[in-house]
């Protein structure tokens, strides 16, 4: 998380609005453009938050399905209706949630810094990138 940015409540969700959530995060975030086989094909660029700062709203859980592969650690969630992955549970941050920055409702994200995460070389990249620290609560 960017400690120089104020923390705000963001809302967002999928294209058809069946999946809705809120997340407390800075207004300026670091988003990760991952080239793993799944993120690359979906062009998913996401920022990571502590799981306790993410909340599904209403009956959103009824519209979510999950896909796993490889180690089955990452839980790639998507809407059963429109197919959009607005968030997922990443392998790099099992204590966090990865929020697709393009799925955040307009008005609360002021700046997005995009960094590359080499998901094709996951073991090396997770250590070098520092991504695991982004799901830790900053006090």
Image (cartoon, helix red, strand yellow):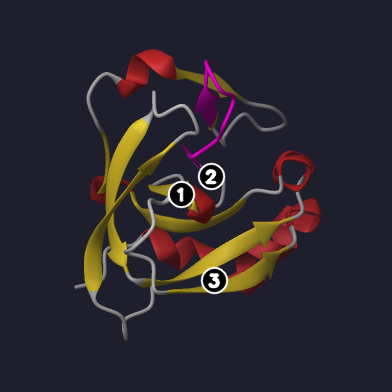
Q: Which residue is mark 2?
A: 90
Query: Taking 3 as reference, is 94 above or below it?
Result: above
Rendering coords of residue 107 (x, y %): 34, 63
Total tally of numbered discs in the picture: 3
Mark sitting earlier along the chain (3/2):
2
Mark sitting earlier along the chain (1/3):
1
User: In what quadrant of the picture does the C terminus appear?
Assistant: bottom left
Q: Alpha carbon of mark 1 to alpha carbon of mark 3: how far?
A: 17 Å
Rendering coords of residue 136 (x, y %): 34, 62
Q: Alpha carbon of mark 2 to alpha carbon of mark 1: how far?
A: 10 Å
- For residue 118, the mark is none
Rendering coords of residue 104 (x, y %): 41, 51
Rendering coords of residue 132 (x, y %): 49, 61
Q: Which residue is mark 3?
A: 130
Q: Secondary structure at mark 2?
A: loop
Q: Residue at x 65, y 73 (%)?
A: 128
Q: Residues within 10 Å of mark 1 (few under 14, many from 20)?
A: many
Q: Which residue is mark 1?
A: 99
Q: Residue at x 56, y 44 (%)?
A: 91
Q: Residue at x 47, y 34 (%)?
A: 14
Q: Over which residues does the magenta segment extend?
A: 77-88
């Amino acid at each position: 998380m960017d400690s120089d940015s104020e923390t705000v409540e963001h809302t967002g969700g999928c294209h058809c609005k069946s999946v809705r959530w809120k997340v407390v995060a800075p207004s300026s975030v670091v988003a990760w453009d991952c080239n793993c086989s799944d993120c690359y094909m979906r062009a998913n660029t996401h920022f990571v938050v502590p799981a306790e700062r993410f909340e599904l709203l209403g009956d959103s859980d009824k519209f979510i399905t999950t896909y796993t592969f490889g180690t089955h650690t990452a839980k790639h969630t998507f809407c059963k209706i429109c197919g959009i992955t607005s968030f997922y549970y990443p392998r790099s941050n099992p204590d966090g949630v990865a929020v697709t920055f393009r799925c955040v409702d307009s008005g609360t994200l002021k700046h997005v810094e995009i960094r590359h995460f080499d998901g094709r070389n996951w073991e090396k990249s997770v250590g070098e990138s520092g991504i695991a620290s982004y799901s830790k609560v900053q006090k």
